[in-house]
Image (cartoon, helix red, strand yellow):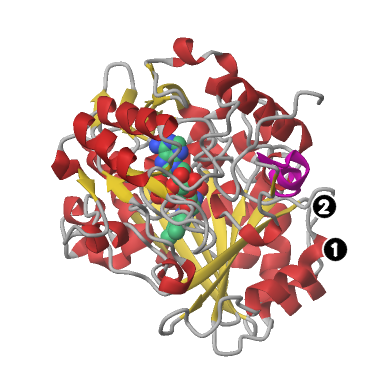
Amino acid sequence: ALASPSNDNDFLQCLSTNIPSQLVQTPSSPSFKQLLVSSIRNARFVAPATARPPLCIVTPTNASHVQAAVRCGRRLSVRVRMRSGGHDCEGLSYRSGSPNSEGFAVIDLAKLHAVRVNPQEATAWVDSGAGIGELYYHVATAAPGLGFPAGVCPTVGVGGIFSGGGIGLMMRKHGLSADNVLDATMVDAEGNLLADKKAMGDDLFWAIRGGGGGNFGIVLSWKVRLVPVPPTVTFFRVPKTMDQGAVDAVTKWQTVAPVLPDDLSVRVVVQNRQANFQALYLGNSSAAVATMGSRFPELGVTRANCKEMSWLQYTAYIYFRDDIYNKPLDELLLNRSMTLGPFFKNKSDYVKKPLSKDTLEKMFLWPEGAATGQLVLEPHGGRMGRIAADNTPFPYRSSVLYNIQYVEFWNGEGTGGKVTPDWVGSLYDFMAPFVSKDPRGAYVNYRDLDIGANKVVDGVTSYESAKVWGESYFGPENFKRLAKIKRKVDAGDYFWSEQSVPPLPLNQ
Ligand code: FDA
């Protein structure tokens, strides 16, 4: 660890000789605050009590600025944190966990957001600062008939979501976003530009495709394989209250959804004691209704539940709903300006054996208090189950039925009156016996500092402390391999955060 107080002024001086001054903002700059919060999604991390402002924010417009920032940081013992879309669930891309910790700079990649599509090759190069909505838009407009599997919220950054895997409604057909990365360019811990995977070597290229953001270097852009999408896809939605048999339906869903044809993905959102089944079918509505009729008749899906649209419209519809009929898609999907959402806290689990009806009923009825809790159940299976657990650092493959995301939202002033939410924490504790264990799994992109944070002992990040959270995200074998790669590419542990992969100790 970089223990000594940083040479802040020398660092800023070094930046100023290498990077145009308008691309470096310090807290005294009039637009600093606005820039800092520009991509903060969670009101929890705007509150002064939980945030330490960075020494500066660098907004590079080319690779040399990123290299210069890393080289200055290395030379003058100032760490950098990198931010793409700013959606990190614990805000680690722009804040440090404690107000008293060492100073750091933020490299904010928002200005590097180009998407270059090659329709003939069915590939694209996308810069890390692009949002996934921008990626979807540029792919579908430049190459109709092609799409890309990633997440649901259009402002999520490519840099973060690819780094941690990237789950979404096309993963049953095409895998994670990271499974479709063919090449990348990045700046390493020495400030070197690694122009392709050959320059990275197999290990580092493996690590950046799902091994978590902020660990191995700053990925500038990614070459991805685009996937075929049919001209018409189908959305359907079936809401069910508990009186209408929601618990029975989710009980059955657990064993049906992971084995449906790969073209059909049905996820469940549970909120206010109601289950909302939401689907993507890669085809038209009559085929969707027929498949559901034979595989899951209890849900009673009819044409009336369905909407047909293009794949691009779908990527907007799943988030903006009927707004897509009033606003142009570019306005919705390319818009990066955000209104700050509520306070929220995420947790996640993996389910390997179906939960009992009794357990599900308790989840539906979990006391709400003043807060609002939401569960998102995301089915695996399909292609996800046919990829080996060590193919990428993301280990949740054939053994998994579905992922649970728990989210608690609340509104409030300052810290929101409560820094430790209780709905999500108590439900998570209750769930322990029923979900994956030894280690209990979690999805790195739903980052959760409660499951563990790095401890620094005598200036060195303890590998044992990191195993606690690291094995949850990656499984024991993949985590050890990540730590070994870290030792090779960043032995000095320059890219550090409360949940960064530490270098594997030499004796292990
Ligand atoms: P951010 O910029 O905050 O970075 C996240 C982490 O990656 C940080 O550690 C950061 O330092 C590091 N990082 C950022 N850029 C990097 C780069 N260029 N190179 C290396 N490291 C980098 N996930 C999912 O799989 N499917 C989904 O549907 C959703 N939906 C969703 C909705 C909402 C509202 C939120 C808040 C989050 C999600 N997520 C998600 C989770 C999301 O994938 C996760 O938070 C990503 O890390 C966000 O990436 P950003 O670039 O936006 O974050």
Q: Is residue 427 visible?
A: yes
Quadrant occupied by the N terminus: top right
Is disc 1 surrounded by few (<14), some (14 to 19) or many (20+) residues within 10 Å?
few
Q: Residue 433, which numbered label?
A: 1
Q: Identify which residue is drawn at 78% across, 43% down.
A: 464
Looking at this view, is 293 or 259 the one in front? 259
Q: Would residue 462 be counted in the magenta stretch?
A: yes
Height in image: 169 above or below 293? Answer: above
Q: Is residue 130 visible?
A: no
Height in image: 341 above or below 394? Answer: below
| Magenta-colored span | 460-471
Q: Identify which residue is drawn at 50% across, 33% down.
A: 178
Could you tell whether 108 is left or right of 197 in the image?
left
Height in image: 365 above or below 90? Answer: below
Q: Residue 437, which numbered label?
A: 2
User: x%, y% of residue 409?
Assistant: 50, 76
Quadrant occupied by the C terminus: top right
Mark 1, secondary structure of its residue: helix
User: x%, y% of residue 193?
Assistant: 37, 19
Looking at this view, is 349 or 402 the one in front? 349
Say what amino acid the circle numbered 2 marks. Lys
